[in-house]
Image: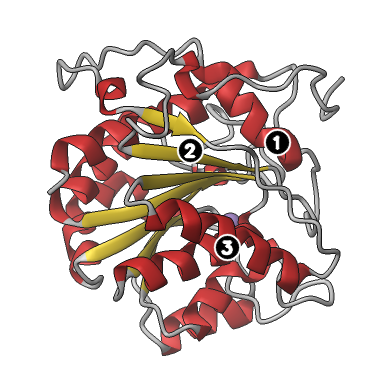
Amino acid sequence: MSGAPHPQSPPNFLGLDPPECDFEHAAAAILPVPFERTVSYGRGTACGPASILRASTQVELYDEQARDEPYRMGIATLPACEPQSADLEAAIGEIEARALEAMDSGRFVVTLGGEHSLTTAPVRAARKVYGAIGVLQFDAHADLRDTYEGTPWSHACVMRRIHDLGIPSAAVGLRALSAPEGAMIRDQSLPVIWGHQLDEAEQRFDALLDTLPEQVYLTFDLDFFDPAILPATGTPEPGGGTWWPTLRLLDRLFARKRVVAMDVVELAPTDDHPASDFLAARLVYKCLGHWWRNRI
Ligand SMILES: [Mn+2]
């Protein structure tokens, strides 16, 4: 049943009971966006949000590193956002409206994808709500193409669209890109920690963060991770990040910057690789914990 829709509607994030899952009580909100329009290789990202939510019910609520229970902040799961428009740009606009509504309520909004093309929407919303922001991208791919397969709204173009908005960005883990993308990074001195530099990422990370403004939007494409620990993604690339070193980078990010919102995208769940779903759910909870501990 790989990629097939699940018959039951998914649980809320972590399977929380009231009051912790109530929107009124919640400091954070999960926005599921099962958006899949331009995927070029493996399919299935439309099932990503539901699979992350299902896996999240098995995540331990206690964080043994911080010795706290981040779920006590209150984490509401919003109804899924499924844009009706066939036009890609209009669909991105529909997602932006939902993200804007959630961010305007003052909550820390975590968007669950879905394919990476959706990121333009919450980034535009975050800039409206929070003002000047930078974007930090964890990804195997640069996603800096001007157009791809006939559309500027492809997952392969998402960071280019963000660049077009004049929003500064930095990337970690890149290891698959075209010659023009490589030239753009070089010519414009875009800050990158490459995939082949991941062994030294912890030494290089502070300098990368220094290139971004105080407020940061985090976009986390799960193909950043090595396929050995996260095979269930549409375009897996060898030589990616591993678990604990990545969490140390995220710990540093949330301590040094004000992360205003984030997304986790490109899970393409299969029954063969439930560990990928669980990793994604863990990643979201770890980030929520970091945000909560560092909130102003
Ligand atoms: Mn991507």
Name the residue type under label 3: Ala
Name the residue type under label 1: Ala
Report crowding for label 2: few under 14, some 14 to 19, many 20 or more residues within 10 A (C-alpha).
many
Kindly identify the residue that appears in the image at 18 percent across and 52 percent down.
203
Q: Indicate which disc, 3 or 2, sits on the residue closer to the N terminus.
A: 2
Left or right: where does residue 177 sit relative to residue 288?
right
- For the residue labelled by badge 3, is the local secondary structure a helix, a strand or a loop? helix
Q: Quadrant of the N terminus?
A: top right
Is residue 141 something one can see in this rendering? no
Mark 3 lies on residue: 97
The x and y percentages for residue 78 are 54, 37
Q: Is residue 136 above or below residue 291?
A: below
The x and y percentages for residue 64 are 21, 13
Residue 92: assigned label: none
Left or right: where does residue 222 sit relative to residue 208?
right
In this rendering, which labeled residue sits more in front, label 3 or label 2? 3
Q: Is residue 203 above or below residue 170?
A: above
Mark 2 lies on residue: 30
Is residue 239 something one can see in this rendering? yes
Q: Indicate which disc, 3 or 1, sits on the residue closer to the N terminus.
A: 3
Mark 1 lies on residue: 268
| Label 2, label 1: how far apart the Cα atoms are | 18 Å
Kindly identify the residue that appears in the image at 46 percent across and 51 percent down.
102
In this rendering, which labeled residue sits more in front, label 3 or label 1? 3
Q: Is residue 278 above or below residue 27?
A: above
- For the residue labelled by badge 1, is the local secondary structure a helix, a strand or a loop? loop
Q: Quadrant of residue 89?
A: bottom right
| Label 3, label 2: how far apart the Cα atoms are | 15 Å
